[in-house]
Amino acid sequence: MSKSPQVGPLTPLTKKKFFDGLAPWQVVLSLLPLGLLFIGGAIGGGLGALGMGVNMKIAKTQLPTASKVAAMLGVGLAAVVVFLVVAGLLSNALNG
């Protein structure tokens, strides 16, 4: 019979924090689209989460600071516009 291999102690996994490496202003601008959650419920929350994900990607790029701010604010504005369009279409469809 062969012996089973000896396994040493397992090293604990290091958890990577979600906002690790971001400046406070980047965290605030990343979370800004989540404000739609309070206005639009599930639809607003879904669009806000999508906008937050895009903002997180932008915040971690090598763009200049002014470009990051403009892009992140643009994502927030786009999320609001898409929410208003979807809400208007749903309202029109449901109310005839």
Image: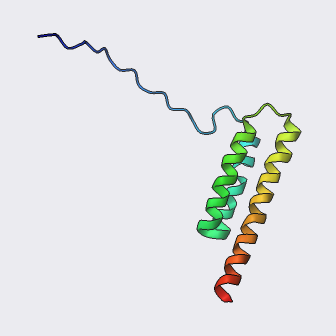
| Residue furthest out toward the left | 1
Q: From the viewer's perspective, is residue 88 above or below residue 34? A: below
Task: Between residue 92 and residue 55, name the one nearer to us.
Answer: 92
| Residue furthest out toward the right | 66
At x 57%, y 35%, the residue is 17
At x 75%, y 64%, the residue is 82
Q: From the viewer's perspective, is residue 87 above or below residue 82? A: below
Residue 42: percent from left, percent from top: 59, 66
Residue 31: percent from left, percent from top: 69, 51
Task: Between residue 38 and residue 78, name the one nearer to us.
Answer: 78
Q: From the viewer's perspective, is residue 83 above or below residue 69? A: below
Whether residue 96 sits left or right of residue 74 in the image: it is left
Identify the image quadrant of the N terminus: top left
| Residue furthest out toward the bottom | 96
Identify the image quadrant of the C terminus: bottom right
At x 75%, y 40%, the residue is 58
- For the rendered model, the colour scheme is rainbow
At x 64%, y 84%, the residue is 94
